[in-house]
């Protein structure tokens, strides 16, 4: 990989295609028997052969997958020659909750490659998990880059750059050798070109895909030959889902409850899943409401034959009136 390769287009150079019309309702907000709000979006489900089984809305309109792109970013880090495995590789693909074991491993990874947390260019943040954030603040801690949910990915990116003698101070530049390799990996897995380039909340380049492309990428990771970067990432995530998300997160529940499934959510309410039978799904809630993710994902799992305790746990989204449940967020399809 050479830094002389063409730099991806600047976001301002990429035309934006507005939605053709209102998306279908994916979830309803029901309080005291009254529908007080709805969440619209698009869904695609792929058969094991990659063909579209069914869809809702406009799945071919590109979206920013946000952190659902992290498995591809982690595979690119392996392609760059960094030898990660187990919990370390899972954390490289993580939106971690900021639990102590996440932060300890992210810091240890930096140390193992001769780096410090000062090199991280993700922004200072609190733990993503609300319980962890309360405990963190109660202990007198302040926002740090290491605590930000993407710190494992950034630690791995920096380590890959150090291994290759690539610049550390510009590792988030879209034209950096590592980020060019990420783009190649994303496009190869999705089977389509990146539709637009942006900047993610953590500062890393963000690459837009269609929902079928995102679902294809997850399916490709599960189907990849053992030992390939893609399969290594999928295997690490599925073996150590607590490091991908946390102990109180739906991605963890799904990968523990449905052995062989690969699951990753992204900010602004994006979700991608590859199922152990070869099928895959991806969806985006238009308004970015992550509270709708669980009910929509649970309904899709039920429709695809994975009803049960795991789907019920993922789908639980109660609405409270005082200290009493008075409603719920429920799927509407």
Image (cartoon, grey):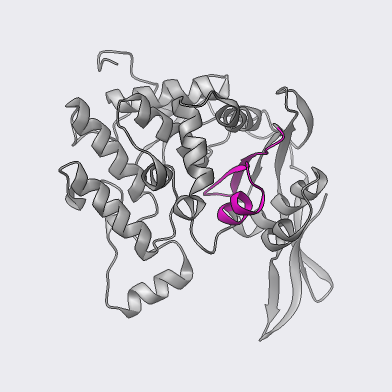
Q: Residue furthest bottom?
A: 323
Residue 98: x, y in percent? 39, 61
Q: Is residue 252 magenta?
A: yes
Which stretch appears magenta? 251-277
Q: Give coordinates of residue 167: x percent, y percent.
A: 18, 30
Q: Position of residue 324 (x, y in %)?
A: 71, 84
Q: Work out whether residue 300 can be spotted.
A: yes
The quarter of the picture where residue 100 lies is: bottom left
Q: Which residue is painted at 67% across and 38% down in the image?
A: 276
Position of 53 with respect to 124 (left or right) is right
**Given the current orientation, which residue lies at the most extreme front position?**
226
Tag count: 0
User: Which residue is depicted at the point 19% across and 33% down?
Assistant: 162
63, above or below 297, in the image: above
Residue at the spot x=61%, y=56% of the render? Answer: 253
Q: Quadrant of the N terminus?
A: top left
Query: Looking at the image, which is closer to me, 208 or 144?
Result: 144
Q: Is residue 207 visible?
A: no
Rendered residue at 66%/29% (across/down): 212
Quick check: 287 left or right of 83?
right
The percent position of residue 319, horizontal first and vertical second, equals 70, 73
- State which quadrant residue 48 falls in: top right
**Was residue 199 drawn as part of the magenta stretch in this picture?**
no
Apparent side of residue 77 relative to residue 222 in the rendered image (left or right):
left
């Amino acid at each position: 990989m050479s830094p002389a390769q063409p730099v991806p287009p600047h976001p301002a150079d990429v035309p934006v295609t507005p939605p053709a019309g209102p998306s279908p309702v994916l979830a309803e907000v029901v309080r005291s028997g009254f529908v007080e709000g709805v969440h619209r979006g698009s869904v695609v489900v792929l058969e094991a052969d990659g063909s579209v089984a069914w869809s809702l809305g406009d799945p071919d309109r590109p979206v920013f997958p946000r952190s659902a792109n992290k498995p591809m970013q982690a595979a690119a880090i392996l392609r760059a020659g960094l030898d990660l495995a187990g919990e370390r590789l899972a954390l490289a693909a993580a939106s971690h909750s900021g639990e102590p074991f996440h932060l300890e491993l992210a810091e240890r990874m930096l140390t193992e490659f001769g780096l410090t947390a000062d090199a991280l260019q993700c922004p200072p943040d609190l733990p993503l998990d609300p319980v962890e954030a309360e405990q963190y603040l109660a202990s007198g801690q302040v926002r740090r880059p290491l605590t930000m949910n993407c710190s494992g990915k950034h630690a791995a990116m920096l380590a890959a750059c150090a291994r290759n003698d690539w610049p550390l101070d510009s590792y988030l530049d879209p034209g950096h050798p590592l980020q060019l390799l990420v783009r190649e990996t994303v496009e190869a897995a999705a089977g389509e070109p990146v539709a637009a380039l942006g900047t993610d909340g953590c500062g890393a380049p963000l690459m837009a895909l269609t929902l079928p492309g995102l679902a294809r990428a997850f399916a490709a990771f599960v189907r990849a030959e053992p030992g390939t970067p893609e399969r290594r990432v999928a295997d690490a995530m599925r073996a150590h889902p607590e490091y991908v998300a946390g102990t109180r997160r739906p991605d963890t529940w799904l990968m523990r409850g449905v052995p062989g499934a690969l699951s990753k959510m992204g900010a602004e309410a994006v979700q991608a899943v590859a199922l152990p039978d070869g099928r895959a799904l991806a969806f985006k809630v238009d308004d970015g409401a992550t509270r709708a993710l669980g009910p929509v994902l649970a309904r899709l799992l039920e429709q695809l034959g994975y009803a049960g305790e795991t789907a019920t746990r993922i789908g639980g989204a109660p609405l409270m009136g005082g200290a009493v449940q008075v409603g719920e967020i429920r799927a509407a399809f």
